[in-house]
Image: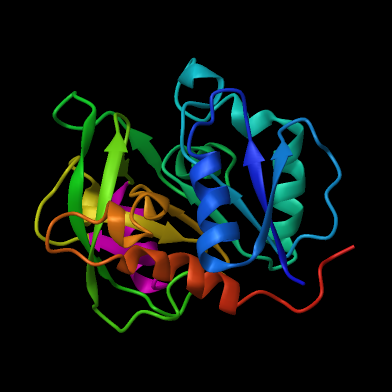
Amino acid sequence: MAKIGIAVFPGSNCDRDVHHVLNNVVGVQADFIWHTKDHITGYEAMIIPGGFAFGDRLRAGIIAAYSPIMQEVKRMAKDGLPILGICNGFQILVESGLLPGALMMNDSLRFVCRWTEVEVKNNKTPFTSKFAPRQRFGIPVAHGEGRYVADNKILKELKKKNQIVLQYSNDDPNGSSDLIAAICSEEGNVMGMMPHPERASESILAAEGAKNEAITIFRSLVSNLKPKAIA
C-alpha cells in the first residue's frame, strides 16, 4: 500500500488538513513526520504543508530549510520521488534549493486570503497529470509572502523547460512574476505551489459556483506513486 509522508515543523498549521484529505477523501495512507527525523523509509512521496514554520522568523521557510528532515526530502527528490510543497512548503522548497527563485511579500503588503482561479500550464507532472491542458479551476490562497519572483534568466529557463505548472488566470493576488502560482523542478517531480488544494478538496468547502477540482492535485499524485517505496 502506498504511503505519503507529511512533514511537520513547529508552526505548521495545514498539516492536519492535508492528512484528512489524503486519508479520508482520497483514500491513501498519509502519516505525520516530525521535522527532526533524519532517516525516512517506506514512503513514496512527501508533502510539505502550509503554515508558519518556526514562526517565519528571519524569513519564511529559511529555518525549516535546515531541519534534518529536509536532507531526507532532498534525497527523496534526487531519487525521483514526488515532493509537493504547499504555500509555506513552497517557501521551504525554494529556501532549501530544490526550486529556483524566491517568495517575497505580496505587492499589496497585506496578507491575502480569498479564492482565485488558476490555469494548468503543464499537465505532465505527477501533480497535474489528471488535469486537461489549460484547464482552469478555483482554489483559495492564504499568504503574506506569496509573490514569486525570479530574474529574467531563471524565468527564461522555467519557460523553456516547461517548469511553470500553474498560473493565476482571472486575477493577480500577489504580484508574482508572470502570474506564477506553481513551478516544478527540471525533472518535474518536485513542485511548489502557493494556493491551497487541501482547502478546496471537498464540495462543502468550495466557493459559490465552484467545484472541488483542486483535489485533482492529490489524485494525480496518488496515481503517479511508484509501487515500491525506497529503502
* Residue 99 visible, this orientation: no
Quadrant of the drawing holding the C terminus: bottom right
Q: Residue at x 51, y 30 (%)?
A: 61
* Residue 175 visible, this orientation: yes
Residue 114 image position (x, y, % from top left): 19, 42
Residue 217 left/right relative to 150: right
Q: Residue at x 64, y 35 (%)?
A: 8
Residue 152 image position (x, y, % from top left): 29, 52
Residue 121 left/right relative to 217: left
Residue 67 image position (x, y, % from top left): 70, 30
Residue in front for this viewpoint, 28 or 40? 28
Q: Which residue is drawn at 84% across and 66% down?
A: 230
Residue in front for this viewpoint, 171 or 153? 171
Quarter of the image for residue 142 reads top left
Residue at the far left in the pictured view? 170
Residue 211 image position (x, y, % from top left): 24, 67
Above or below, 60 against 179 in this view is above
Q: Give the range drawn in magenta.
A: 151-167
Above or below, 209 against 177 in this view is below
Quadrant of the drawing holding the N terminus: bottom right
Q: Does residue 158 belong to the magenta stretch?
A: yes
Q: Residue at x 59, y 72 (%)?
A: 222
Quarter of the image for residue 224 reads bottom right
Residue in front for this viewpoint, 153 or 166? 166
Residue at the far right in the pictured view? 231
Picture mark count: 0
Residue 179 left/right relative to 226: left
Q: Does residue 166 belong to the magenta stretch?
A: yes
